[in-house]
Image: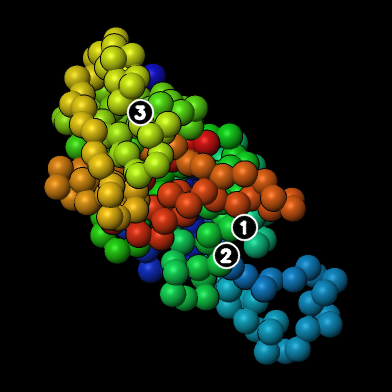
Amino acid sequence: MTFRSILVQLDDAPACGPRTLAAARLAKRFASALTGCYAAQSSAATQQDQALLPVAEIASNLSAKDVRHRVEAQFHQIADAEGVASGMWPAPANNGQPGIVDAVRCADLSILGQPAVDDDRGGFQRRLVENALLGGGAPLLVIPAARLTDDIGKRVLIAWNGGREAARSVRDALPLLVSARDVSVVSIVEPRAMATDGSRTYGELRAYLAAHGVDARFKRLDAANITAAERLLSEAANAGADLIVMGGYGHARLREWVLGGVTRRMLESMTVPVLMSH
């Protein structure tokens, strides 16, 4: 198994450059085609609406178009420097939401930015990740804005609860797991949540990973006084992990996607890249 096609979200955030570089290096590692999809918060209007806009807003939209062109040029420059074939997703992104979900559905792995919690972009990016994760039908690799290692997937931590989403994330991450130097599996037990203890299926998971040449270590952790997300991030830091693999949980409510609590907190607090599958 490998990633033949990798998609990366492009936007006007400062973290776009490092995210693009991480995507290009993964594409180089797996001999993948790399596709960029511009998805950023924008007030751009249709041509028909432009005539009704104030001059200042029209100028702002033209400026946003210039920014997009610069970002796309940077994307191709980074891909060329890494020796990776690159192209842009052909569908117009506009505000980014529908376009990137379609793009995610046509890629083996999609790389998106972490939603911010303290600026105007946060709401847009959170909805973007929600739609792509829960509606895209494919794995997402979410890159934190704060810090990024040169290599992703050398030391991997798998969050395992034995559920469908966790199982799918492991299968989707197999190309990274097979090439990793170190793989750990942790099952986090919260008070009054014993039913989600994934350690009961450790034997089956160990055999499955071994069949793919992955020799993993297993650990069962308690989270008595902190949340599962905090416990997982703490264990990742202790293990020196540069990637967390976990299920992405959520459901549809009133025609909108809603993330589960642990998934939402991980996206808010993540300090290393997280591969999620729903």
State left or right for residue 185 relative to residue 163: left
Going from N to C along the chain, the mark reached first, 1 or 2, is: 1
> Gap between marks 3 and 2, in whole Å?
33 Å
Disc marking residue 121: none
Crowdedness near tag 3: few (<14), some (14–19) or many (≥20) residues, C-alpha within 10 Å: many
In percent of width and height, residue 35 lies at 49, 43
Q: Identify the image quadrant of residue 85.
A: top left
> Gap between marks 3 and 1, in whole Å?
36 Å
The residue closer to the viewer here, 210 or 259, is: 259
- What type is the residue that disc 3 sits on? Gly
The residue closer to the viewer here, 261 or 255, is: 261
Above or below, comparing residue 157 to residue 131 in the picture: above
Total marks shown come to 3
Q: Identify the image quadrant of residue 56.
A: bottom right
Q: Identify the image quadrant of residue 202.
A: top left
In contact (CB < 8 Å): disc 1 and disc 2: yes
Disc 3 or disc 2, which is closer to the eye? Answer: 3
State left or right for residue 150 relative to residue 267: left
**Residue found at x 16% / y 30%:** 181
Residue under label 3, please give it: 198
Above or below, comparing residue 16 to residue 163 in the picture: below
- What type is the residue that disc 1 sits on? Gly
Crowdedness near tag 1: few (<14), some (14–19) or many (≥20) residues, C-alpha within 10 Å: many
Residue 85 appears in the rendering = no
Residue under label 2, please give it: 124
Disc marking residue 96: 1
> Gap between marks 1 and 2, in whole Å?
9 Å
Going from N to C along the chain, the mark reached first, 3 or 1, is: 1
- What type is the residue that disc 2 sits on? Phe
